[in-house]
Structures are given as C-alpha cells and as structure tokens.
Image (spheres, helix red, strand yellow):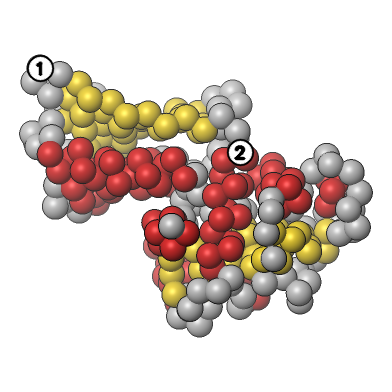
Amino acid sequence: MTRVAIIGAAGRMGRELCRAALETQGIELVGGTEQLGARELDLDLGELCGVGKVGVIATKDPPEEAEVLIEFTSPEATVEHLSYRRPAVIGTTGFSEGQRVRVEEASKSVPLVFAPNMSVGVNLLRQAVWGLSARLTGYDVEVVEAHHRNKRDAPSGTALLLARAAAEGRGQNLDDVAVYGREGLSPREEGEIGIHALRGGAVVGEHRLIFYGPGEEVEVIHRALSRRTFADGALRAAKFVATAEPGLYSMKDVLEGSE
C-alpha cells in the first residue's frame, strides 16, 4: 500500500483526489491538509468528498505516516510545501521560472513527479503530437484550449505541454515560435505555433491541436470529461514516486515505469 496525503484536500481537485484514493487498490488515504482558519479544517475527509465518514481528518500539516504528498493548489503554496521534503506528485500549474527552479532544486534531495496534466491520455497524446509535427513539416500549427471560467492560468499547462511537443518535433524552441492569440495586423510567420485560451462555464478541459496543410487538415483532440481522470493519473504517479530515487520526473517516466 502507498500511503498518501492530499494537500488542499477541500478544493475541487482535492476532493476528487480524496475520493479516488479511497476507491483505488494499493492506495491508503492517511491524511489531507487545509489552511489554518479554513472551515474544512478538522473535518472528516470522507465526508468532504461525499463517501461518508472514514476516520481521517483534515489537518494543517500532513501526517508523518504519509509516504507521498499529492498537490494541485497554487504555485505559491506548492513552493512553500516543498519544505515538507517528502516524495510528492505536483499537478499545480502556472509556475514562474523562478518557482520552477525551486522545484528543480528540491528534487535533488527528494523524488518529485511534476506534470501539468496527469491524464494518461494527454501524456500519450504528447508523444503522438511530437511524431506528427516531425512528419508534417510545412504545416501550420495551432493549439486551442478551453477550461472552466475559474481557471487562473492561461494558457493551460497542458496547452504548453502539447505546443512544446509540436515545437520539439521540428527541432524548435517553443519560446522562439509561440504566438499567444492574435490581434490587429498579425500575419502568420513561417514556423510559428499559435496558442489560444478559452474560458467559460464548467469545462473540465479540452485541448485541440490542428495541423493546417495546403490541401488537408489534421486535428487531434483530448477532452477531459471528469476530474477523476487527473486523480487516477496522480495516484498512479504516487505509486511510482514512493519508491523512486531523488529526481524530477514526468508522467512519461511514470507510464514507462508502470509498464
């Protein structure tokens, strides 16, 4: 059994993670955290996620018996929680360059899975996008993502993951070719990759990557129909990182290590 604690257990993703942990074979939910002053502090995690009392309560800090911490919160909170110095699965997005450096530094002493999207489908799609981009040379590439109205960062970490895969498939650096939206006089430059973010309603997550050729279009789409797909991927990553050596790992590492 891999004993896990959920950081930010009362959030939308936190509750989904708690529910999934209670229902997943090989995983034991031993704790969850909330901030001091939060109304959910000291509440039963089973009741928080809608499955009934399980005898595990939300606390300020994760319990000592937690082998792996799982976190989908904010970049500021995630960086602060690196001080726990325990194996962790980080699904938080929107990091600044400086915050990413702090995560990388922490991974020198503890194993961390750091991925903008824990979905198995998205991470397999990333590999497919790399291959398509490498072969569809000369095709224009556009990435369009949509999320619920309350998502804070734009474009999403997943959109950047897929756009980076498309760039790398052509030997490009995404920072050199990315164009975020268009306005006014903005003709397409050769080799650029357009990235567009939509926000509205309760969309869990949709990502479309389109290759526009002179006589055809090739489009790949991933739609997340439930946050459970991210939770299941995070728990798979938790099993992996529990026994990993210190280092910074991706979902590609998790999937390859689970084969």
For residue 215, which numbered disc appears in the image? Answer: 1
The answer to whether residue 92 is left or right of residue 190 is: right
**Image quadrant where one finds the N terminus:** bottom right
User: In this orientation, which residue lies closer to the viewer: 3 or 157?
Assistant: 3
> As drawn, is 103 to the left or to the right of 85?
left
Q: Residue at x 67, y 72 (%)?
A: 67
Q: Can residue 26 be seen in the rendering of this structure?
A: yes
> Which quadrant would the C terminus be assigned to in this image?
bottom left
Q: Which numbered tag is attached to residue 227?
A: 2
Tell me the quarter of the picture where residue 204 sits: top right
Q: Amino acid at mark 1?
A: Gly
Callout 2 touching callout 1 (CB < 8 Å): no
Tell me what residue is drawn at x 13 percent, y 31 percent.
139
Q: Secondary structure at mark 2?
A: loop
9 or 65: nearer the viewer: 65
Residue 35, position in %: x, y? Answer: 77, 59
- Neighbours of disc 2 within 10 Å: few (<14), some (14-19), many (20+): some
Question: Who comes first in sequence, dot 2 or dot 1?
Answer: 1
Res 16 quadrant in image: top right
- Residue 229 location (% of width, % of height): 57, 40
Q: Amino acid at mark 2?
A: Arg
